[in-house]
Image: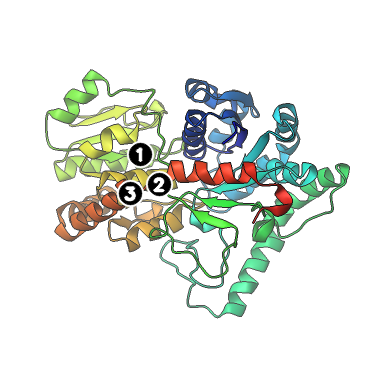
Amino acid sequence: MTPRHFILTPVGSSGDVHPFVGIGRALRARGHDVTLITAEPFRLVSERAGLVFAPTHSAAEFDRLSSHSDLWHPQKGLRLILQTAARALRIEYARLEEHYVPGRSTVVGHTLAFAARVFEERHNAPAATLQLAPSIFRTLYRQPVHLLGHDSTSYPRWLKRVFWWTIDRAFIDPQLAPALNRFRRELGLRPVSRLFREWLHSPQRVIGLFPDWFAPPQPDWPPQLRLTGFPRYDEADQHAVSPALDTFLRDGDPPLLFTPGSANRAAAAFLRAAADAAIRMNRRALLLTRYEEQVPASLPPSVRHEPYVPFSLVLPRCAAIVHHGGIGTCAQGLAAGIPQLVMPLGFDQPDNAARVERLGVAAAIAPARFTPDRLAEVLGALVSSSAVAARCRRWADAIRASNPVDDTCALLEEVAATPPAAAS
């Protein structure tokens, strides 16, 4: 097709930004120009991928948010994220205005890229929303899991409607709607409410970056939604396994890999429990976190810390992965064909944990029960189970048989070539 310009607007941590970078690289390989608008810490990975970079939050602002004591609280964390996204509306919109070329550019938004949705409306711009995890989609059928171990699917539909109405009116809209609607009035747009019911999804195209076997589509999901699959970009083209880490991986049984998430700066207890459990199991372990201050001060030779290494380069050489339930980490574990143990904290993580459990490849532990003894017990059962191993191989084969990045690019090219008023 005619070369186009795609403006990608991810919001969040590495797990949010990496999929957009991977798709941006693929769009570049297909002959298009790509601009990435996101926080300053992702400039290097963006520019190494050949994308034009435009910053929103500074590195200091990003650091303050990732260090905030409320970030990983189940309720306060979402409130903090929504308030931060609302405050970023104007700078993100300004960046879009700087880079948008009418007749050539297509806007590609993230769940929290509210400025992208406003820009789409104000300029009648070709646009799509990429949704990384299925928990964002409202339904009166199979419910997303918001609290570990609690599935409300069997509730009557009237009660589900009341639940969603209450969440919108009492929690989400108060954090977002005042700032959003003030900005919309300045642009001549009508006010909106119940923002997470439908408004955050582009009416032109929504792309779910997960497969249907991970999250079967529900009858009342948006009709403009298409599912492609896990993009799984992790900077493997920009990093290599160090000789020291390669030696560690070679010289012994496959280790257990523990990671609390790329933006988690309150994971000292997680990593202490991880090291203790590995020692009790007489297993080797690899701890991944960029924040060295939360790693236990004294580790035995059988437990190694690395600040960052692409999952795709190490997970196939590991026995299992223990993590926070981020959608990207779940996807990498599935692709590697290894068991997963998940300790979800908030956001989409409880739902992701429930979905990998249903696939038969994982177990989940609540933070309050994340102790060395419990870890050793559950991990031991997972890695010794032939049934779990067989299901891990099944889903890894399913991922290898798909091409989600190319499929996503093709859908975005369709959006770019279709006048917005005619988009389905």
**Lower position in the chain sequence, tag 1 or tag 3:** 1
- Front one among 296 and 243: 243
Along the viewing direction, whichever of 346 and 158 lies nearer the viewer = 158
Q: Where does the image place residue 383, in percent across and percent down from the top left?
A: 18, 51
Q: Is residue 79 visible?
A: yes
Label 2: how many Cα within 10 Å (few below 14, some 14–19, many 20+): many
| Side (left or right) of 321 relative to 2 | left
Residue 155 rendering spot, x and y as whole percentages? 52, 78
- Name the residue tied to disc 1: 259
**How many residues crowd around disc 3 within 10 Å: few (fewer than 14), some, or many (20 or more)?**
many
Farthest residue, direction front = 1
Q: Nearer the viewer, mark 1 or mark 3?
A: 3
Check disc 3 and give the amino acid type.
Ile
Which residue was labeled with disc 3? 399
**Where is residue 146 shown, x and y percent of the image?**
50, 61
* Mark sitting on residue 324: 2
Where 363 sits versus 189, above or below?
below
Colouring scheme, one of rainbow, by chain, secondary structure, one colour: rainbow
Specify the amino acid type for callout 2.
Answer: His
352 over 261 or under it: above or below:
below
Question: Residues under labels 2 and 1: Cα distance?
Answer: 7 Å
Structural distance between the alpha carbons of marks 3 and 2:
21 Å
Three-letter amino acid code of the residue under disc 1: Thr
Label 1 and label 3: CA atoms lie apart by 22 Å
Query: Would you identify the image quadrant in which residue 395 lies?
Result: bottom left
**Residue 391 locus on image (x, y percent):** 23, 58
